[in-house]
Amino acid sequence: MRVLLVNCSHPSYNLGMEKARRWWERQGAEVWYAKSFEPLLVSNYDVVWLSAIFSWDVLELCRLARIALDAKRKVEVGGPGTFGAVQFIIQELGLLPQFKPDSRFEKEPGEYLYVFWSRGCPAKNCSLGYPRDGRPPVCSVPEMEGSKYTLYTDIEPARVIADNNLSAVPRSHQELIVERTLTKAFPSVDANSGFEPHSMRPWVIDIWKRLPLVAWRFAYDEVGERDKVLATLEMLKAVGIRPYRCHIYCLAGNEPLEDCIQRVNEINQWKAYAIVQRRRPLNWLSKKHPLPCLHDWTERKLIDFQRWGNRLAKGIPWNEYIPNYRES
Ligand code: SF4
């Protein structure tokens, strides 16, 4: 069996495709891993799997999948990027994308750059995954992975822990993750998606401060979360973790401009580090098409705000920065 795996979100690391590669190899298949392929060469393969991590890579995924289908190859498509594009993909390819973790290789043994010790997120108070206003979710985790946790115990630790809401994971599982990760003696560990202020507790910090975390990551995505974010900073300070070690994700475009400015400014006043990410709907298919925006945002303003928030907000107020973007 000759298998071609295509990571349509190259150069981003695609954990699902890495697991799929091992899964196929374990079954004796010859596996090729690529970011794309030459149409004339697709007949060299019996099976073609294509994966997109981001929705804006789905158009390319469909283009390549169509070539493989027309060449009568056995084709499957999937990845988290296909979550918001299921109907589009069915229409384009007649295939149902595998947008959830794939049970065939989700627990494929091996060493990877990333690891998930849990799947799912039960944070019903989070409006990004559980919108209260009838809007589609901005976070796909509850629908993709479930509103209850699935916990993995017998897996290989990795330096990047990608779980989506670590602080709400059961305490015994948090202890297991940290114990198992410590056995690898990584010089640094990145709890990449991090913790949620709503579920942060002193015992969570006691467990995780045993690891050499590159930063304490958590989110301040809505002004209404201010008290919880401040309480998290206080809990961390109480055990000697200074605010500059806190990298706070700050979504832009989900609230009116003034609220987003307030959040960025507050993070800087607290002497923490703001990581501004612009809101991009899960069904936004292409960087070549206008980004659907809420409130008074435009895509241009969002890109500019992200740049200001991540690089310049400590020194320049937003209202002084506006003339610069108008001139660009
Ligand atoms: S807490 Fe995080 S993972 Fe859970 S729904 Fe909200 S944004 Fe998604």
Image (cartoon, rainbow, N blue to C red):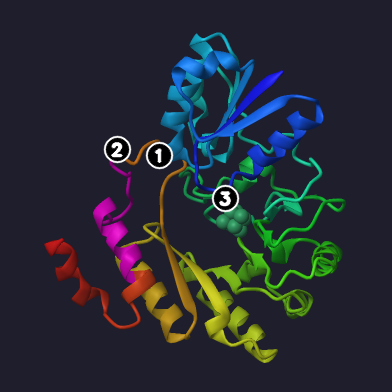
Report the residue marked by disc 3. Answer: 130
User: x%, y% of residue 44?
Assistant: 58, 16
Give the Cα separation between the discs numbered 2 and 3. 26 Å
Describe the element under mark 3 as helix, strand or loop: loop
Q: 119 above or below 172? A: above
Residue 293 is a magenta residue: yes
Where is residue 69? Give x, y as percent: 52, 13
Q: Residues within 10 Å of mark 2 (few under 14, many from 20)?
A: few
User: Residue 328 lies in magenta, yes or no?
Assistant: no
Q: Which residue is mark 2?
A: 289
| Quadrant occupied by the N terminus | top right
Q: Residue at (63%, 69%) from the top-left corner?
A: 198
Q: Is residue 39 above or below residue 204?
A: above
Disc 3 within 8 angstroms of ligand 1 (CB): yes
Residue plotted at (47% across, 85% down): 271
CB within 8 Å, label 1 to label 2 = yes
**Sequence-first tag of 2 and 3:** 3
In this figure, which residue is indicated by the disc labeled 1? 284
Q: Quadrant of ligand 1?
A: bottom right
Question: Distance of mark 1 from mark 2, alpha carbons?
Answer: 8 Å
Could you tell whether 44 is left or right of 256 in the image?
Answer: right
Please say if the residues under marks 2 and 3 sit with CB atoms less than 8 Å apart: no
